Image (cartoon, helix red, strand yellow):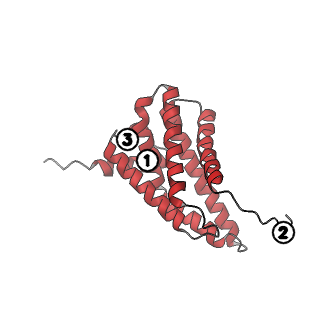
Amino acid sequence: MNSPSRSILAAGFETCVGIVRFRKGPEDLPASTSLLAAALAGAVLLRIALLSIPTAETRINPVVVMLLDFGITLLCVFVALRAAGHSARFLQTITAIFGAQVVLAPALFASRWMLLTYYEQPGIGGMARLFYVVVSVWMLAVLVRILRSATGWPLFACVLLALTIEVLVLVAALTLFPLEQDLTTPA
């Protein structure tokens, strides 16, 4: 008896779980614009949730920061794949990056919330910072592995690319929304 085939979204999600567990790569994802749209929608919802956590700094426009993040990521991955001679892998690579973020969304959200909520509390503040660092390093390692699989470049080059993407987003955000310093109090 024929069983119904799984949806492309279910297969894509399962593959993204495998990517986060370092068992699969972006090449295992189907090249599907609908899967990319679902991963991008999930990544947007994740960013909205992360940016909705109240912080002391409220003058940053979350839409602009989100557009910077997505735009710089898309541009850097496009340029890297083009330089590597693998432009055809763009759809799967971007889907893998955003899909991995969606899979890690609960850990990303929980770590950011804990960091912002308990940062200055003795004991639990240290645990919150450690949890945040572990989740951030895990996400960075996933990104590096995706980039390495997609470009075929050495590990060091992919680490530099991943860090360059993060630094470019940070610099662009700080350029648009500089930190204000109180110059009346000594450092």
**Amino acid type at mark 1:** Gly
Asked where in the image residue 130 lies, by quadrant, the reply is bottom right
Which comes before the other along the chain, label 1 or label 3? Answer: 1
Relative side of 43 to 182, left or right: left
Name the residue that disc number 2 marks: 185
Q: Where residue 18 is drawn, which disc sits there?
A: 1
Name the residue that disc number 3 marks: 29
Which is in the foreground here, disc 1 or disc 2? 2
Residue 36 x/y as whole percent: 37, 46
| SS class, disc 3 | loop
Which comes before the other along the chain, label 3 or label 2? Answer: 3
Residue 110 x/y as whole percent: 54, 66
Q: Residues within 10 Å of mark 3 (few under 14, many from 20)?
A: many
- CA gap, disc 3 and disc 2: 54 Å
Residue 37 x/y as whole percent: 36, 49
61 and 125: which is toward the camera = 61
